[in-house]
Image (cartoon, rainbow, N blue to C red):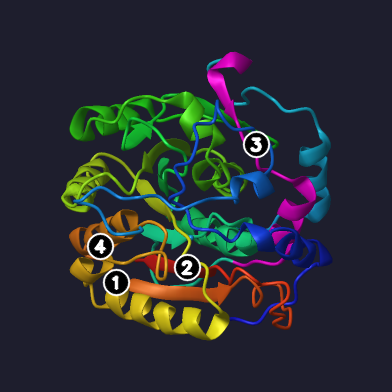
Amino acid sequence: MRTRKYALGAALTALVMLCGCNAAPAETATPAESSVTAATDAHTESSVTAATDAPAEPTETDVPQTAINEQLTSPAVTSTLPGGYIPRSELLDCNFFDAVDFNAFDAGSTAYDTGGEPLCGVAPHHLAAGHFVAGMYKAAAAAEPETVVLLAPMHYRSENVICTTDKGWNTAFGAVLCDTGLAAMFADKLGAPYDDEMVEYDHSASSHIPFIKRYLPDAKVAVLLVSPRAGRDFPERLADTLYEMSQSKRVFFAFSIDFSHYLQPNEAEKHDAGTLKAVTEGDTGTIEHFTDDNVDTPYCLSAFVRLSALLGGKITKADHGNTYTVGNMPYNPTLFTEGVTSYFVFLTS
């Protein structure tokens, strides 16, 4: 793993969010039923009983920092793109954005270099590792994608096992437009219903949106949330749909995935080694049977591996760490009573 000196803000972020290193598939309440107004709330999650066909239980161009600060302190805009303004009611909010933390993530990251043009990637949604997310999107900027397709786990209980939205997003850096054509493909090809509220209030997707706007300012987005109840055949169907999308335009496929949960560091490292082996060997059968000990969304990880093969790309491990190592903190078991969350960045080029 690359060594970095992190800003104080990033270390504080890690400390604040330690209690939030729970697993992604925590479909315990709909956004309407729970008050999800802060990142720490979003990381308080419980287990999900999976269906019989699902796993047992189920991560540039430099801009001066002053420019970032100016953008963050200016009023949120609706649209700076051609075609006029977008009504505020047509945009979803990024409820888990914090300007101080974002500046720390930006300063503490550089674009990952995999020796080729990035086609798709995996990065966390647990923002204790926000610099991992920044590094992935800084790398993706080199490919100049027209659209970022974001795949993320569904944390809240819903009658639907997948969902999408045709709405754009309001960020501190300006509006992000939805690629409604690709969102419609999720609906038509996979049967995904439109559920704006579910997508908006799940940190697995909305936490990534400001990074997309910051580092790929002209890109549109299309989001799909995936439940652990999506079905054993879903990863293959999803990968085939994503590959079809890649044939029509320049797309970067971003998979928002956290890895080992609830384990002490030595045990997490063992499971991370198994995860790395399965990913680099393309062992989707093993991946789809992983539990929270390895990854929070096996189906999305399997789809990433399958899509990488369809695109003819090579998967590279760009980064790895866990809740305490990403903040350069000594391990303290009194702080990590529920174990740690581990993170990978994978890039396919």
Label 4 SS: loop
The kind of residue tagged 2 is Val
* Nearest to N terminus: mark 3 or mark 4: 3
The tag on residue 111 is none
Q: Residues within 10 Å of mark 3 (few under 14, many from 20)?
A: some
Count of residue discs: 4
- Within-10-Å neighbours for mark 4: few <14, some 14–19, many 20+: many
Circle 4 residue:
288
Q: Nearer the viewer, mark 3 or mark 4?
A: 4
Which dot, 1 or 2, sits closer to the camera? 2
Question: Viewed as shown, does residue 105 lie left or right of 284?
Answer: right
Range covered by the magenta-colored residues: 87-110
Q: Nearer the viewer, mark 3 or mark 2?
A: 3
Q: Are marks 1 and 2 in contact (CB under 8 Å)?
A: no
Q: Nearer the viewer, mark 2 or mark 4?
A: 4
Please say if the residues under marks 1 and 3 sit with CB atoms less than 8 Å apart. no
Give the Cα distance between marks 3 and 4. 30 Å
User: Is 217 located above or below residue 84 in the figure?
Assistant: below
Q: Which quadrant holds the C terminus?
A: bottom left
The verdict on residue 186 being magenta is no
Q: Residue 219 in the image: state x and y as whole percent.
A: 48, 39
Look at mark 1 in the image and give the residue it sits on: 314
Marks 2/4: CA distance?
Answer: 19 Å
Q: Secondary structure at mark 2?
A: strand
Q: Mark 4 and mark 1 in contact? Answer it, CB < 8 Å.
A: no
Q: Are marks 3 and 4 in contact (CB under 8 Å)?
A: no
Quarter that holds the N terminus? bottom right
**Can residue 82 be seen in the rendering of this structure?**
no
Q: SS at mark 1?
A: loop
Q: Earlier in the sequence, mark 1 or mark 2?
A: 1
Disc number for residue 345:
2
